[in-house]
Image: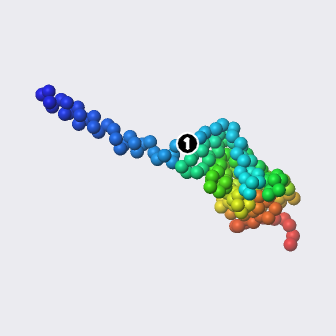
Amino acid sequence: MKIIVPLVLMASLSGCGGSDSDASLGSKDDFVDQESWNPIIILTREAKKRAVVKSGHMAKYAEKKEVILEGNVDADFFSIEEEHMSNLKSERAFVYEKTDNLLAIGNVVVVSDSGVTLFTDSLYWDNKLEKITSNDTVMLTTETNDTLYGVGFESDVDLNHWKILKPWGVTGREK
């Protein structure tokens, strides 16, 4: 009887640890490496300031090489001469460290210094190409207050040379 109790106890305890609990922790890609509140991130190219990004919270994932920004994301974009061109606001954003590109998600609004305003659900900024793109539905208001709609969008960062890929809408203008 004395030998049976320890064997039963060992058998029942051996199923309580090991691989199941390790798997529930997730991979090391899921762990936050650094965290900050109210951060300011400066993105550069060729040693020139191209964007200044602020948010309420930042989580940096070293293994994924990305930074997640949440809470009132506010990004100012600059020309190669470091002159302000436009401002972006969104609910969250991802900054990819290898390229310094940015993906903004959730109620994205871009306002250019010339007065053009873009509304969409997501927007990708390519730092190297100096382009912004979206595959979502967009609404664009021009400096003359024309409002255009469509799906898909491409533009330079200052919204001077833009294209709606699948436009739709009604206009009262004559040809």
Task: Indicate whether 32 appears above or below 150.
Answer: above
Q: Position of residue 41 (x, y in %)?
A: 70, 45
Q: Is residue 151 visible?
A: no
**Which residue of the protein is positioned furthest toward the bottom in this rendering?**
175
User: How would you rate the neighbour count of disc 1 (Cα within 10 Å): few for under 14, some for 14-19, many for 20 or more?
Assistant: some
Q: How is the image coloured?
A: rainbow
Task: Indicate whether 77 appears above or below 72.
Answer: below
What amino acid does circle 1 point to? Val
Q: Residue at x 62, y 55 (%)?
A: 98
Q: Quadrant of residue 132?
A: bottom right
Q: Position of residue 145 (x, y in %)?
A: 85, 57
Q: Position of residue 5 (x, y in %)?
A: 18, 29
The quadrant of the picture occupied by the C terminus is bottom right
In the displayed structure image, the side of residue 156 where residue 95 appears, left or right: left
**Which residue of the protein is positioned furthest toward the top in this rendering?**
2
Q: Residue at x 87, y 59 (%)?
A: 144
**Which residue of the protein is positioned furthest toward the left in this rendering?**
1
Q: Residue at x 34, y 41 (%)?
A: 18
Q: Residue at x 19, y 30 (%)?
A: 6
The quadrant of the picture occupied by the N terminus is top left
From the image, tell me which residue sits under label 1: 32
Q: Secondary structure at mark 1?
A: loop
In the displayed structure image, the side of residue 101 where residue 140 appears, left or right: right
- Name the one closer to the observer, 87 or 37: 37
In the displayed structure image, the side of residue 96 where residue 11 appears, left or right: left
Q: Position of residue 119 (x, y in %)?
A: 73, 54
Q: Is residue 12 visible?
A: yes
Q: How many numbered callouts?
A: 1
Task: Indicate whether 148 appears above or below 86.
Answer: below
